[in-house]
Image (spheres, rainbow, N blue to C red):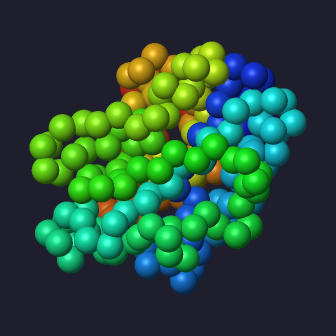
Amino acid sequence: MASDITYGPDVALVVVDMQNDFAHPDGSLYVTGGDVAVAKVNEQILAAREAGALIVYTQDWHPAETPHFVTHGGTWPVHCVKDTWGAELHAALEVADDATVVRKGTGQADGYSGFTVRDLESDADVRTELDPLLRERGIGRVVVVGIATDVCVKATVLDAVELGYDTVVIPDATAAVDLEEGDGARAVAEMAAAGAVVS
């Protein structure tokens, strides 16, 4: 269970995309249960902070025009446009003034994983600063929470496993889009099958 997670200086808690457009009922791409997940995520943030673990927040930070959006040929409604309310971290989320934030999808890219984005012009994976940041801090274990279970959380967890981190995901501290019923549960099963610990 989530309460069994031991945090310490060699552990990083990665808080994925707890932004207004996803976690607030007024958000443009609100994920059902996103606002409820904030409290569960905060429990992990406080536990990690108390134990001296690194806490990293990821943020979608899209330009107003990008092929990531359905308005420009992509999949998703316009969301998390940089410097807007929708892109801000949820007001109820525990965030220190000196918080470490990794922004993704900042250009012409699909920004799903906290570790990599897919450049839509070159169709190449581009690394974010998250992995070098964790390596520099000597992080061996990554605990992942946030939104959405079946999209950005899953992508971040799968990348973390592939990069060799001891990876834990806490489904109770996530919320799923569930474009198709059961997507969230299938994502959890996929993460477990890849080698992540489901706590």
On screen, residue 197 versus residue 71, left or right, reads right
Residue 145 to residue 5: above or below: below
Q: x, y percentage for residue 27?
A: 50, 78
Q: x, y percentage for residue 42?
A: 75, 53
Quadrant in which the N terminus appears: top right
Q: Is residue 34 visible from the viewing direction of this image? A: no
Q: x, y percentage for residue 182?
A: 39, 56
Residue 195 to residue 12: above or below: above
Quadrant in which the C terminus appears: top right
On screen, residue 65 versus residue 164, left or right, reads left
Q: x, y percentage for residue 131?
A: 47, 28
- The residue drawn where x is 64% and y is 67% is 90
Residue 110 to residue 139: above or below: below
Q: Quadrant of residue 70?
A: bottom left
On screen, residue 42 versus residue 65, left or right, reads right
- The residue drawn where x is 64% and y is 21% is 137
- Total numbered labels: 0
Q: Quadrant of residue 179?
A: bottom left
- The residue drawn where x is 75% and y is 30% is 53
- The residue drawn where x is 74% and y is 67% is 92
Name of the residue lying farthest toward the right: 50
